Image (tube, coloured by chain):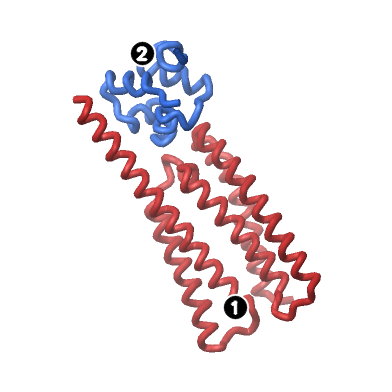
């Protein structure tokens, strides 16, 4: 048994358990509109996941030599998570009033860029042992950058709304 | 449909969207969505907003 793989699997299990327990408090910190939006985001992500898995299943029946089914399944999950995050971020339902955006954005951007760098390093140096070493880090990096772009767009929209509000108040005065 | 009555009542109390949102325990964007007519609040939130702005439900949320 590969100890590294076992350790990764156990880490993911522990993370899932922690998230499940911590989510109970987080749900109370979202207001009613945010909860509705998050529900819609989950639906959208779920449908996206089903569509991606259907595509992977259809492609796997064609016996394509370049197709790596486990990689595609994990990629489908990444895409689904990204859809959820982007929808929730653009509709102001990702962060609560207590969660700070800037540290999250910084950490997320760093992790995404590190993954991109790692993936491209394997690609150009030819050091990849299998497709996991290239496709997943590059995909995670790109999807992470997409989430950061969504955060940036949301910040600009919020700033514009605040400016409009201030302008309207000045007009009334 | 925009809720101009809410906006006017908020302005009369000299409250920003952020300040009203904090007092009603919601996000600023939720108040913004209600004023723009993009979101219909639940009765509990309507009551919370009315209490903060010292208005009745009819005055803020009834269509005429």
The kind of secondary structure element at disc 2 is loop
Badge 2: chain ID: B
Residue extending farthest left: A173
Q: Is residue B19 left or right of residue B63?
A: left
The kind of secondary structure element at disc 1 is helix
Residue occupying image coordinates x 47% and y 48%? A89
Badge 1: chain ID: A
x, y percent for residue A171: 21, 29
Does residue A51 lie above or below A36 as drawn?
below
- Disc 1 and disc 2 in contact, CB within 8 angstroms: no
Residue occupying image coordinates x 46% and y 47%? A90
Q: Quadrant of the C terminus of chain B?
A: top left
> What's the mark number on residue B54?
2
**Chain B as rendered: colour:** blue
Visible residue check, residue B26: no
Q: Quadrant of the N terminus of chain B?
A: top left
**Chain A as rendered: colour:** red
Q: Nearer the viewer, residue A97 or B30?
A: B30
C-alpha gap between disc 1 and disc 2: 61 Å
Around disc 2, counting alpha carbons within 10 Å, would you say few (fewer than 14), some (14 to 19), or many (20 or more)?
few
Does residue B45 lie above or below A78 as drawn?
above
x, y percent for residue B30: 44, 33
**Label 1 sits on residue:** A133
Q: Is residue A164 left or right of residue A65?
A: left
Q: Nearer the viewer, residue A168 or A107?
A: A168
Residue occupying image coordinates x 48% and y 60%? A146
Q: Nearer the viewer, residue A134 or A15?
A: A134
x, y percent for residue B3: 41, 23
Pointers 1 and 2 within a single chain:
no
x, y percent for residue A148: 44, 58
């Amino acid at each position: 048994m590969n100890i590294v793989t076992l350790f990764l699997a156990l880490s993911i299990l522990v993370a899932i358990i922690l998230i499940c327990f911590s989510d109970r408090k987080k749900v109370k910190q979202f207001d009613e509109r945010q909860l509705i939006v998050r529900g819609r985001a989950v639906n959208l992500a779920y449908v996206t996941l089903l569509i991606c898995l259907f595509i992977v299943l259809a492609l796997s029946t064609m016996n394509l030599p370049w197709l790596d089914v486990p990689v595609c399944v994990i990629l489908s999950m990444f895409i689904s998570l990204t859809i959820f995050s982007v929808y929730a971020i653009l509709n102001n339902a990702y962060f609560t009033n207590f969660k700070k955006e800037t540290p999250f954005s910084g950490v997320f951007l760093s992790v995404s860029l590190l993954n991109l760098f790692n993936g491209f390093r394997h690609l150009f140096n030819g050091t990849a042992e299998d497709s996991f070493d290239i496709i997943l880090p590059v995909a995670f990096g790109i999807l992470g950058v997409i989430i950061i772009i969504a955060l940036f767009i949301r910040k600009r929209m919020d700033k514009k709304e605040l400016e409009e509000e201030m302008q309207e108040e000045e007009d009334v005065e | 449909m925009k809720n101009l009555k809410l906006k006017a009542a908020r302005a009369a109390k000299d409250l920003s969207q952020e300040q009203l949102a904090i007092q009603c325990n919601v996000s600023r964007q939720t108040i913004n969505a209600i004023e723009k007519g993009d979101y219909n609040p639940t009765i509990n939130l309507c009551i919370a907003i009315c209490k903060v702005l010292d208005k009745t439900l009819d005055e803020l949320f009834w269509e005429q």
